[in-house]
Every structure is written in C-alpha cells, then in structure tokens.
Image (cartoon, rainbow, N blue to C red):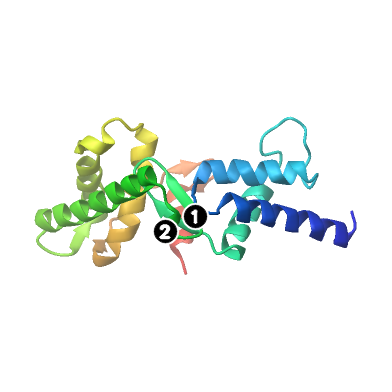
Amino acid sequence: MTEINLEKKINNIKNKLESDFKNKELEQGKYWDTVDQYLRDENITPSNGKKYSNTKLSLEICCKLENKLQLKTFRGIQNNYITKSEENLQENAKKDINQFIILKENSKNYLKSEFESYSVHEKEFDFKLEKYINSQDITKKNSEIKNFQIFYTIKEKISANYNFIKEVKKPEFLGKYDVNDIINLIDKD
C-alpha cells in the first residue's frame, strides 16, 4: 500500500469520525467498534469476520484519533462518553455523567467522615469506598465488574488527598511474577 493511498484512507476515517461527532457523543465501546469497522472498511486491518482483528492496533489508533480530533471523554455510571464538546452531550448522557459526579463527591464526603486523618491503610480505604459505592441505589443494578470500574475511577480521582500507610504485602504470584512487583512497577514514575 502506498503512503499516499494510506494517507487518503486515514483521512477518510478522520472525516467519517468528524461527521459522527457532529452534535453528539458516542459511548466509548461504540467509538472503539466504529473505529475498528472503519479500519476494516478501508482495508487497513483484515476483514476476516472477526471484530478487532488487531485489538492492540485498533485501540492505539482510537487513542491517537481521540487526541488528533480533540475528543473528550466523560465518565458516567453506566458508560464513558466521547464527544467533541460537552455541549454535544445528549440528555441521557448528561444525566449519567452527573450521577457519576455526585457519586464521586458523596464518596469523598463519606470517606472524610470515616477517617480522622488523611493517613490511612489503603486496604481500609478500599474496603470503605467499595462498600459505600455498592450500597448506593444507582449502582445496585450494575454488574460487579461495572462497580469495580467505578470504584477504581473514583479511587483514582480522590485518593491523591490521602497518604496510604504502606503495608508489607505477602507475595501473590501470577505465573512467575509477584503481583505486588507488577503493581509497584506500574506505579513507578
């Protein structure tokens, strides 16, 4: 495939996405599916009947296109939404995003009331946050995985205020690697 031909195909995808995002949002999963389909439509990735024939490539392209097209991601209770502008969000998406914002703020306030200081054991922090999130009416219908995603997103957003007291963790192996080592290396700057 010549570089000019490939450039034309990539521009076709960008133009289609620009059109897709005119005055509306896409749920994150729908955005990924759309980009994957456009890659197949343009014969950039194989069209072998399998969705995400090259998952890594598709997701990498999705992320690059988000930056290139200046798309924004908003977190909701049920979905993540991708859009060009907050004004383009439909009412149901705005409601979902607002519910997440309220849950995040309420979680933050709940944890403030539970802990006397910002120095806490991470395990206790996690336990209280997860219990609080799972006790809320808006999360009761969710799957365990969905609530786990919400938990980690909220934890990431509010835990910067806390000083986690380091605990000595027992080795926990995933294959030949200690899970604690994996997590520590991910956290390493």
Query: 124 left or right of 10?
Result: left
Q: Which residue: 11% across, 53% down? A: 114
Distance between the alpha carbons at the discs numbered 2 and 1: 7 Å
* Image quarter of residue 11: bottom right
Most foreground residue, 23 or 163: 23
Q: Relative to the observer, which residue lies in front, 147 or 187?
A: 147
Instruction: Tell me the element at label 2.
Output: helix
* Image mark for residue 86: 2
Asked whether the beta carbons under mark 2 and mark 1 sit within 8 Å of each other, the answer is: yes
Furthest residue toward right:
2
Residue 83 circle label: 1
Give the vertical position of 148 relative to 118 (above or below).
above
Residue lying at the far bottom of the rendered structure: 189
Identity of the residue drawn at 46% across and 56% down: 73
Look at label 1 and name its amino acid: Thr
The extreme front residue here reads 23
Q: Residue 65, position in %: x, y? A: 62, 58
Given residues 168 and 95, the one toward you in this image is: 95
Question: Quick check: 134 left or right of 86?
Answer: left
> For the residue marked with disc 2, what is the amino acid?
Glu
Write the residue at 68% across / 56% down: 15
Res. 55 visible in picture: no
Total marks drawn?
2
